[in-house]
């Protein structure tokens, strides 16, 4: 072997491996081995519903219940965020983001595009309804929000739309949803629905497909009615007329027994299926309360239920160790609330019923027949049909086992709805516009008013220059943002 | 030149010789015409030099001197042909020397060497990375070295911890004193926003030093059981030296594969021709915590001085009650919950090594055993390590040497939750009221877990909430085990096909399986009926490096070498885990014994690097040494458009005393050096792609989760992290310059280095506007600088044949500064001003002045902020003057601050400070400077050494104290009910005194107020600004002391023929001087993560250790 041969051999050895073109690219290298890179519309629809369960049964609903004093946050975050109105931008950021990022509006729009492309009107309709519910709820919580420019890949910093225009957009989405669902109804609806096709609201076993679609249409109408009521403080009675018209096409399948009525479990009620595994597929209320004992009954709701001798008292709450139903005071959850026995007996506040509503598989009511009935009642009442209002209120009362009333006041209507909407996020909206029931805000006089909105999430505020700085809010507002939204001009 | 070709069978026979060497002992070449060279190597004052290497380089023959400095080298007959050969001697710390000898067959030659001192170790051959090596004199960069003696001086079990304080700008942080706790290391400051730990390279092949937290992530989380950094798997006995490449100027030859954080090059011990040497080392160690925390023992549980009685079965003490109850009745037993969970820990370590070989075949074999039972009561904090290493080398042909090194390690770590865990013993112990007898952790009636919040469990209370675990319940019932099996090593072929050409091929691997079973017993808090976390991690690494080095002399005064090489490298990580809840029976802790199991999760990561490099050296007139190097790397983690990157570097070193005559009695050697280099840091894997997620949706913190599956149907949603196809490596460019001086005829040396590095394209997760549908994306937009000085000096105070005293010192400082975080869309469009050093300020109001990079936890959030060091804490503070404050609520802060000193505390009308709601940069965990001083004295066989370590400033968030204050358990809270005045006599600790007892203003200034529950559960502790827990972390510690004696008397050899026996007594952390009020300012819950430094939150303390060691040499 001469010198040149040896040098060539060395060079050849040095270049060993250089020819492996797939050494650096491919699955597990440039392609992520851990996450799928595509998701079907069906898979995304499931995620949308799981995500929305987390929004509608999670912290927003807990605070809504505490702001209206159905419940009281007694410890930790539930005490500071909800009871004491000290929720901050960073506290609520994840909740706000959840309405937009994967599982939120981004996924809803992706599913809609796919459904439109494939002509799947049912999928399109369901997802439009979900968008209406999500964005309508979000604007009721935060007011002005990015919407028309949101989840647009070409827009890095979406502008805020006015709350008024967002509600108009929500109405449009729900109408589009109804149109698509009606188109689906006009198509082939033979046979029963198939749970594997992704509807986790109405597709129980052996539900005919046409029934399933009609229930979606009715729920969409109830939602339209719900959001029209959100505008009554600004737009006056015309919104009652619109709400009435929508609710007449709303959820109409009455509960078949008192238990269904009490817990919003009628077949037409909009509820998500849940499983039994903690931190996996259980209902969020149940999960939260099983690990955190930070929420107890609020005295306002307890007293209302006690005064009426309402069967929902024992259905909603557990009696305490002394056998008493006790609600906590917003200013001090540890004080001896009315109903407590004489000292020295201990007397803690009641907690949410463990045998029904805290069961992991409990299907938390989101939009119900009772809500629709009470929307009808309110709208009829406000549009002069007090007889019709009584009928709607009594439909709900008798369904739960309460005696019918001969006539009703507006307070009766709203009190009835306050009870029926237990653990529902929209109870907060009803309170904000009607101030029923009367609650004493947290704090000593001059007490702040009950919080009427959540601050924008810190994720959005720090990255989107269109979100106003706290200093840019009108004078006279408190905290890091105004306490009320545009649709809520009058404080209670 | 001709290759010497043997008959084909000979190589096989030679390989058999390796086995023969092991089985039968060293093989000796015996021939009548061999040449025997003998002699003695001594130092400047005649002291015998042990372990000097005497060699005939041309013949690849060498020998080592014994303890008397004598050596014996035999040249086999066929190779002694009467020629002249160059006999040279090398030993660290002395200049090399050589002499010509004539190899007359059959002759005996005697040659003695007297070497001069070389404190700068200029003649040491050091590895410089990627298969290259060089004489230290020719290096153009600072390279710090630690030899085996220094590494083992105080018997640290963990390689990284053994480096603590010994080198300038090499900063280590031990997470805690738990058995098996990790130590993080950082060289010349943080180069990135994530983790910047140096790569560890053993015999040319990188090995894993990852610290896998229980969730598999590489950054230690703020809770969980201690996990070792994997360099703790190394038996330090197996290594003869560690070279530390300090920065990019030295590491550019590694490109982005070794990262930008420097490299530690370890050389393992090799066998030496000659008699087989046996060394047996036995060590006993005793540990105690450096400190315990002071607790109050006067007040019981309750609120407002009123007791919260809980005597009935299954009663609970509400989470709103702490130790703010009434004074405990005289005669009632109280307990020191700060101390009762500790005992004296002990460790037994034994290492046996054998080494030897013939001229052609050498071997080194060691086995080691390390068993530690830490200082937490009981035996659930243990660390066991069993190691075996075999290094073999065989000269197959005259020009071809093959060698193989293999290490086998098995470890078992048993620990307890620390940090933020309600199952942890820290939180469990230190929040207990003093009159709760925690040691009675089981109810005497029901036999079930009793905690202070649930003191009377009834017979069926298996799953009732305990609030926090009783620490003794956790100590006796939880079982958090980590077991690893690891193999790492390499095969090396060194071929010299031509006189001027050398080819070196190394192929190596590192395989580690880490199996964790974290079992929380049936009545543990936070779980329903107990829980099991099963984690399995696999780390694999494969590395191939092929280097060809050619050298040539261009005339007498110009020599050059050129090395070209190729490197292929793959790292692979896989994790599989499953959680389970609710034990069916209390034991065994197996998945099959649980009622609920969550879906297992599974993750893998694979990264490949294909690199080519070249390095050229030119030596001019034996005094000017130039080097240029270049590397081109392709990395699978880079965006497809940036898959290749160049990393250039170069250096110049001039031994100027060879050209400029300086008075030798003052300066006997001088070198100036200048170097530049670029290195990289790879971005996160798979950051390029948009993917779908299956992660659960979070309700709230603390809240509940919803998997994206409902009703048994799986769901997917777009990950909120947007892919960035343009992601590319981070870049670090570093310039360093320095001077190395040998002074006073080698009695002292001084090295000074200045460096200036700039990191560009630093990857961080930028927040996207969530209403776009995405919350974040990894981008290359960060820029930061590290600038600093390093000084080190050794002074041989006394040098006599039987007495020497050396003093070593190092001092370093690093200034880290984030200079840019890029720009938002609005800033790029010119609608919003860009963030600059001038307009950011502490409040960082302009976008991209700061980004959160670490955890947000109990009032601290860690950030990269323009104009501040990486990891700065942002939080609110009390209202203080000098910040341009006006009205805060109804308080006219601006009015009262007029003409008052900056920093003065505003005290409201009620006598208490108020909170300024503005978030600003408020604390910085990095020290201003660090220093170490070592003293070594030798008198005959007696050696004494001591090492002092100082860290100056650097904030620590003492959230442990803050939380104990809130719970009313810290000794501080005994002042409850007393009146104090802000600005005058508030309880405070070092830096907090500047705030609470500094100048005050405002309507309530000077007002005495009652300090009690409302202060400590509100503004004064975790409920208030972090100001009250932000302490100065300055410390000086007597890190190591050792005294040893070598017995070489005749009686020693009578014991089984030993030639020497060493007895050593050493101590670690024997004394700590600090004003810090917690355990120790060095502990850090956040481990290696840059962003989570300086966090004290219910960590375990560091250990004070006493070590007794016996070493037998045969």
Image: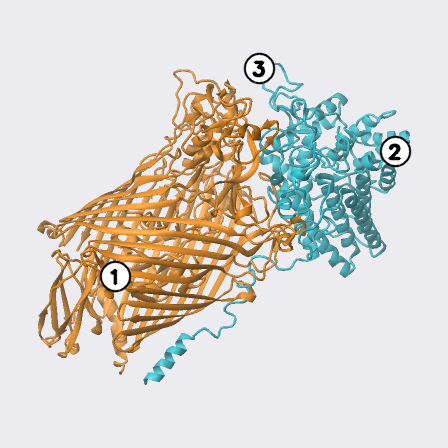
Chain colours: A cyan, B orange
Q: Secondary structure at mark 2?
A: helix
- How packed mark 3 is, by other alpha carbons closer than 10 Å (few <14, some 14-19, many 20 or more), is few
Relative horizontal placement of residue A93, taking residue B63 as reference (left or right): right
In the picture of the structure, the residue carrying the numbered disc 2 is A380
Q: Which residue is mark 1?
A: B122
How far separated are the C-alphas under marks 3 and 1?
A: 84 Å
Label 2 vs 3, first from the N-terminus: 3
Q: Nearer the viewer, mark 1 or mark 2?
A: 1
- Which is more foreground, mark 3 or mark 1? 1
The answer to which image quadrant residue A231 occupies is: top right
Mark 1 is surrounded, within 10 Å at the Cα level, by few (under 14), some (14 to 19) or many (20 or more) other residues, namely many
Q: Nearer the viewer, residue A169 or A482?
A: A482
**The disc numbered 2 marks a residue on which chain?**
A
Residue at x 14%, y 53% (from the top left corner): B1056
In the image: residue B613, left or right of residue A362: left
Give SS at disc 1. loop
From the top left corner, tell me how far across and down residue B964 is, in percent: 46, 30
What is the quadrant of the C terminus of chain B in the image?
A: bottom left
* C-alpha span from label 1 to label 2: 98 Å
How packed mark 2 is, by other alpha carbons closer than 10 Å (few <14, some 14-19, many 20 or more), is many
Tag 3 and tag 1, C-beta contact below 8 Å = no
In percent of width and height, residue B511 lies at 41, 59
Is the N terminus of chain B in the top left, top right, bottom left or bottom right quadrant? bottom left
Is disc 3 placed on a helix, strand or loop? loop
Question: Mark number for residue A344?
Answer: 3
Pinpoint the chain carrying mark 1. B
- Residue A24, given in percent of the width and then of the height, sits at 51, 67
Of all residues, the one furthest to the bottom in this rendering is A2
């Amino acid at each position: 072997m001469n010198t040149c041969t040896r040098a060539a051999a060395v060079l050849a050895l040095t270049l060993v491996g250089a020819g492996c073109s797939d050494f650096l690219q491919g699955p597990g290298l440039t392609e992520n081995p851990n996450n799928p890179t595509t998701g079907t519309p069906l898979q995304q629809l499931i995620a949308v519903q799981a995500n929305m369960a987390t929004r509608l049964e999670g912290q927003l609903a807990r605070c809504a219940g505490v702001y209206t004093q159905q419940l009281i946050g007694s410890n930790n975050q539930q005490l500071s965020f909800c009871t004491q109105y000290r929720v901050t931008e960073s506290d609520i950021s994840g909740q706000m983001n959840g309405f937009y990022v994967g599982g939120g509006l981004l996924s809803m729009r992706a599913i809609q595009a796919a459904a439109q492309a494939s002509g799947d009107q049912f999928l399109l309709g369901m997802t439009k309804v979900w968008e209406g519910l999500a964005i309508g709820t979000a604007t009721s919580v935060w007011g002005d929000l990015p919407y028309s420019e949101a989840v647009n890949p070409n827009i890095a910093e979406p502008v805020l739309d006015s709350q008024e225009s967002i509600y108009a957009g929500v109405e449009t989405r729900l109408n589009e949803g109804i149109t698509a669902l009606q188109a689906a109804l006009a198509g082939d609806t033979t046979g029963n629905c198939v749970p594997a096709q992704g509807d986790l609201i109405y597709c129980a076993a052996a539900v005919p497909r046409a029934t399933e679609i009609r229930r979606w249409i009715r729920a969409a109408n109830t939602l339209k009615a719900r959001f029209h009521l959100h505008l009554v403080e600004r737009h006056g009675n015309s919104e009652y007329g619109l709400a009435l018209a929508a609710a007449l096409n709303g959820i109409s399948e009455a509960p078949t027994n008192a238990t269904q009525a009490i817990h919003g479990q009628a077949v037409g009620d909009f509820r998500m299926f849940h499983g039994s595994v903690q931190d996996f597929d259980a209902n969020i209320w149940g999960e939260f309360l099983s690990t955190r004992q930070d929420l107890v009954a609020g005295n306002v709701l307890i007293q209302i239920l006690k005064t009426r001798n309402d069967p929902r008292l024992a259905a909603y709450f557990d009696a305490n160790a002394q056998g008493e139903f006790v609600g906590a005071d917003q200013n001090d959850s540890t004080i001896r609330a009315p109903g407590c026995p004489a000292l020295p007996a201990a007397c803690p506040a009641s907690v949410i019923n463990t045998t029904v509503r805290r069961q992991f598989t409990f299907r938390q009511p989101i939009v119900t027949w009772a809500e629709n009935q009470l929307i009808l009642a309110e709208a009829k009442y406000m549009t002069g049909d007090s007889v019709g209002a009584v009928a709607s209120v009594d439909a709900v009362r008798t369904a739960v086992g309460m005696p019918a009333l001969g006539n009703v006041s507006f307070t009766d209507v709203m009190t009835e709805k306050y009870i029926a909407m237990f653990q529902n996020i929209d109870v907060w909206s009803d309170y904000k516009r009607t101030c029923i029931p009367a609650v004493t805000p947290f704090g000593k006089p001059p007490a702040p008013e009950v919080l009427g909105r959540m601050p924008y999430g810190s994720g959005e505020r720090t990255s989107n220059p269109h979100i106003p700085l706290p200093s840019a809010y009108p004078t006279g507002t408190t905290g890091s943002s105004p306490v009320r939204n545009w649709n809520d001009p009058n404080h209670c | 030149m001709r290759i010497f070709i043997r008959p084909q069978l000979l190589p096989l026979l030679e390989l058999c010789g390796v086995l023969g060497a092991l089985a039968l002992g060293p093989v000796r070449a015996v021939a009548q015409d061999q040449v025997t060279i003998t002699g003695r190597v001594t130092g400047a004052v005649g002291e015998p030099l042990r372990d000097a290497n005497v060699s005939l380089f041309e013949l690849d023959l060498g020998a080592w001197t014994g303890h008397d400095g004598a050596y014996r080298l035999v040249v086999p007959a066929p190779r002694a042909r009467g020629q002249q050969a160059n006999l040279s001697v090398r030993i660290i710390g002395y200049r090399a020397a050589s002499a010509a000898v004539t190899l007359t067959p059959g002759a005996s030659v005697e040659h003695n060497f007297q070497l001069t001192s070389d404190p700068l170790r200029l003649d040491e051959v050091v590895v410089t990375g990627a298969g290259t090596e060089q004489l230290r004199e020719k290096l153009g960069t600072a390279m710090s070295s630690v030899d085996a003696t220094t590494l083992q001086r105080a018997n640290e079990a963990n390689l990284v911890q053994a480096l603590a304080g010994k080198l300038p700008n090499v900063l280590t942080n031990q997470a805690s004193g738990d058995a098996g706790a990790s130590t993080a290391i950082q060289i010349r400051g943080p180069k990135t926003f994530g983790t910047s730990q140096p790569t560890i390279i053993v015999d040319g092949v990188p090995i894993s030093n990852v610290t896998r937290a229980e969730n598999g992530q590489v950054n230690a989380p703020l809770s969980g059981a201690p996990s070792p950094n994997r360099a703790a798997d190394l038996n330090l006995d197996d290594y003869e030296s560690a070279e530390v490449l300090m920065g990019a100027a030295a590491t550019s030859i590694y490109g982005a594969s070794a990262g930008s954080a420097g490299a530690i090059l370890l050389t393992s011990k090799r066998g030496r021709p000659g008699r087989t040497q046996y060394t047996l080392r036995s060590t006993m160690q005793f540990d105690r915590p450096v400190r315990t925390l002071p607790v109050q023992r006067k007040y019981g549980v309750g609120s407002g001085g009123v007791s919260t009685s809980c005597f009935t079965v299954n009663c609970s003490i509400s989470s709103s009650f702490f130790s703010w109850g009434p004074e405990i009745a005289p005669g009632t037993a109280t307990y020191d919950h700060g101390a009762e969970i500790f005992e004296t820990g002990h460790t037994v370590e034994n290492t046996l090594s054998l080494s030897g070989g013939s001229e052609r075949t050498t071997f080194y074999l060691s086995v080691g055993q390390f068993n530690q039972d830490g200082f937490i009561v009981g035996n659930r904090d243990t660390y066991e390590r069993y190691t075996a290493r075999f290094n073999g080398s065989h000269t197959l042909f005259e020009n071809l040497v093959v060698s193989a090194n293999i290490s086998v390690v098995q470890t078992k770590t048993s620990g307890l939750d620390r940090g933020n865990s309600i199952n942890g013993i820290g939180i469990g112990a230190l929040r207990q009221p003093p009159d709760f007898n925690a040691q009675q952790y089981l109810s005497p009636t029901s036999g079930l877990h009793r905690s202070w919040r649930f003191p009377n469990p009834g017979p069926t209370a298996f799953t009732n909430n305990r609030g926090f675990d009783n620490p003794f319940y956790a100590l006796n019932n939880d079982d958090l085990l980590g077991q690893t099996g690891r193999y790492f090593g390499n095969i090396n072929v060194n071929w010299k096909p031509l006189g001027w050409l050398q080819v070196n091929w190394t192929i190596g691997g590192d395989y580690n399986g880490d199996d964790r079973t974290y079992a929380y017993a049936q009545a543990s808090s936070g779980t329903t009926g107990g829980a099991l976390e099963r984690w399995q991690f696999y780390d694999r690494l494969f590395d191939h490096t092929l280097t060809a080095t050619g050298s040539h002399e261009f005339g007498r005064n110009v020599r050059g070498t050129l090395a070209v090489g190729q490197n292929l490298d793959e790292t692979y990580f896989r994790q599989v885990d499953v959680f389970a809840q609710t034990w069916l029976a209390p034991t065994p802790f197996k998945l099959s014994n649980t009622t609920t199991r969550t879906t297992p999760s599974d993750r893998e990561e694979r990264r490949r690097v294909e690199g080519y490099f070249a390095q050229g050296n030119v030596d001019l007139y034996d005094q000017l040494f130039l080097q240029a190097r270049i590397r081109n790397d392709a990395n699978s983690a880079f965006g497809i458009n940036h898959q290749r990157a160049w990393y250039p570097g170069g250096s110049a070193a001039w031994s100027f005393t060879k050209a400029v005559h300086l008075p030798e009695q003052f300066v006997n050697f001088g070198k100036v050096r200048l170097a530049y280099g670029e290195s990289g840091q790879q971005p996160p894997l798979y950051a390029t792609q948009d993917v779908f997620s299956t992660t659960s949706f979070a309700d709230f913190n603390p809240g509940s989760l919803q998997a994206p599956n409902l009703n048994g149907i799986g769901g997917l949603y777009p990950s909120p992290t947007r892919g960035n196809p343009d992601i590319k490596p981070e870049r670090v460019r570093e310039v360093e310059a320095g001077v190395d001086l040998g002074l006073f005829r080698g009695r002292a040396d001084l090295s000074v280095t200045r460096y200036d590095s700039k990191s560009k394209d630093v990857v961080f997760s930028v927040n996207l506007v969530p209403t776009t549908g995405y919350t974040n994306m990894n981008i290359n937009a960060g820029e930061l600088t590290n600038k600093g000085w390093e000084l080190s000096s050794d002074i041989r105070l006394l040098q006599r044949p039987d007495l020497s005293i050396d003093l070593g010192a190092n001092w370093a400082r690093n200034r880290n500064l984030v200079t840019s975080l890029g720009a938002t869309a609005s800033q790029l469009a010119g609608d919003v001003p860009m963030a600059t050093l001038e307009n950011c300020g502490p409040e960082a109001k302009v976008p991209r002045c700061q980004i959160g990079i670490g955890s947000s936890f109990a009032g601290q959030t860690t950030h990269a902020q323009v104009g501040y060091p990486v990891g700065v804490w942002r939080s609110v503070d009390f209202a203080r003057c000098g910040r341009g404050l006006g009205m805060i609520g109804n308080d006219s802060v601006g009015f009262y601050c007029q003409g008052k000193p900056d920093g003065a505390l505003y005290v409201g009308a009620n006598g208490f400070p108020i909170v300024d709601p503005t978030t600003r940069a408020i604390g910085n965990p990095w020290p201003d400077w660090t220093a170490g001083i070592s003293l070594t004295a030798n008198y005959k066989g007696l050696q004494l050494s001591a090492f002092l370590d100082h860290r100056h400033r650097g904030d620590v968030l003492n959230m442990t104290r803050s939380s104990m204050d809130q719970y009313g358990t810290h000794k501080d809270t005994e002042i409850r009910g007393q009146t104090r005045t802000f600005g005058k006599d508030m309880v405070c600790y070092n830096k907090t005194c500047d705030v609470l007892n500094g100048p005050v203003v405002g309507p309530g200034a000077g007002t005495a107020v009652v300090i009690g529950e409302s202060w400590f559960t509100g503004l004064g502790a975790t409920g208030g600004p972090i100001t009250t827990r932000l302490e100065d972390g300055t410390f000086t510690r007597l890190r190591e002391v050792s005294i040893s004696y070598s017995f070489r008397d005749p009686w020693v050899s009578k014991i089984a023929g030993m030639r020497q026996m060493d007895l050593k007594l050493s101590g670690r952390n024997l004394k700590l001087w600090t004003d810090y009020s917690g355990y120790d300012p060095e502990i850090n819950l956040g481990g290696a993560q840059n962003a989570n430094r300086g966090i004290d939150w219910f960590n375990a303390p560091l250990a004070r250790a006493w070590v007794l060691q016996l070493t037998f040499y045969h």
